[in-house]
Image (spheres, rainbow, N blue to C red):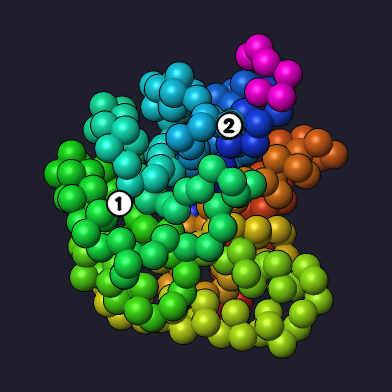
């Protein structure tokens, strides 16, 4: 079974930088440290309000890192133009609202089919791998396949939140939805990624799903790096995911 990939999201390095202004800490430096520590790619979300990652961060990440760049973006004309200019390895289309602290829920690909169709076509036409950040609801997964996006990223936030709140019945229901969704997506020919709210324990658990080939993790890693250092935190996460993967092949 293939080794599960780890994508590190450096958004919140930029959040810290922007809180005071200036150039420190630098998310590009963080990306390079994460890569040296063993991650397989870097994720960065350029929001409409530029609350963390900025345009020059995206340009520098594309130019300076040695691993794939996963450009998280809303399916707007502005972001599509930036993606087509930057040509990242991948573009992950996500829902976005100015009032949210972080991405809340998955993209409604069923309801936004008309908007997403030309965006997916344009990005794929430029050779950019497209993924859709969605919940594990069957209708959303089936529509993602119909729209021709080769990858989905399952939003794991509800599961992680339920576990953190010790709502075990709710957590189990969300986990079964994720498991079934990963199986359905794989059967439809979709590559399956997952992310949002993951920590060492939940990453180890989800890494045991053989259909999941990549996890994208940001906030937890950046938070833990305050205590352990970014390189060590990435190594700890890599080890947790590898333990989970071994369970899948046991």
Determine which residue is flagged by label 2.
51
Q: What x and y, as percent, mark residue 6?
A: 53, 51
Q: Quadrant of the N terminus?
A: bottom left
Labels 1, 2: front one: 2
**Few, some or many residues within 10 Å of mark 1 (<14, 14–19, 20+):** many
Q: Residue at x 37, y 58 (%)?
A: 132
Q: What x and y, as percent, mark residue 75?
A: 33, 46
Q: Is residue 20 magenta?
A: yes
Res 130 label: 1
Residue closest to the eye, 2 or 181: 181
The span shown in magenta is: 18-23
Q: CA distance from mark 1 to mark 2?
A: 23 Å
Q: What x and y, as percent, mark residue 11?
A: 58, 36
User: Tag 1's secondary structure?
Assistant: strand
**Few, some or many residues within 10 Å of mark 2 (<14, 14–19, 20+):** some
Q: Are marks 1 and 2 in contact (CB under 8 Å)?
A: no
**Is residue 23 shown left or right of residue 200?**
left
Q: Residue at x 44, y 23 (%)?
A: 55
Q: Residue at x 32, y 33 (%)?
A: 78
Q: Residue at x 60, y 49 (%)?
A: 100
Mark nearer the N terminus (1 vs 2)? 2
């Amino acid at each position: 079974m293939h080794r599960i990939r780890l994508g590190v999201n450096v958004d919140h390095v930029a959040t810290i930088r922007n809180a005071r202004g200036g150039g420190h800490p630098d998310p590009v430096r963080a990306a390079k440290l994460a890569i040296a520590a063993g991650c397989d790619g870097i994720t960065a979300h350029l929001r409409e309000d530029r609350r963390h990652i900025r345009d020059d961060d995206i340009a520098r990440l594309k130019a300076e890192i040695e691993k794939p760049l996963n450009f998280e973006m809303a399916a707007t004309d502005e972001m599509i133009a930036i993606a087509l200019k930057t040509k990242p390895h991948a573009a992950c289309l996500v829902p976005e609202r100015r009032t949210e602290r972080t991405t809340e829920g998955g993209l409604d690909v069923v309801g936004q089919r008309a908007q997403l169709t030309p965006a997916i076509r344009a990005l794929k036409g430029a050779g950019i791998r497209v993924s859709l950040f969605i919940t594990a609801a069957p209708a959303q997964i089936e529509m993602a396949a119909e729209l021709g996006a080769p990858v989905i990223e399952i939003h794991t936030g509800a599961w992680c939140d339920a576990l953190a709140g010790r709502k075990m019945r709710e957590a189990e229901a969300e986990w079964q939805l994720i498991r079934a969704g990963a199986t359905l997506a794989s059967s439809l020919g979709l590559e399956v990624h997952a992310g949002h709210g993951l920590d060492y324990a939940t990453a180890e658990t989800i890494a045991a799903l053989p259909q999941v080939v990549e996890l994208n993790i940001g906030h937890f890693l950046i938070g833990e790096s305050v205590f352990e250092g970014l390189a060590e935190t990435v190594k700890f996460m890599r080890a947790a995911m590898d333990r989970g993967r071994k369970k899948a092949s046991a």
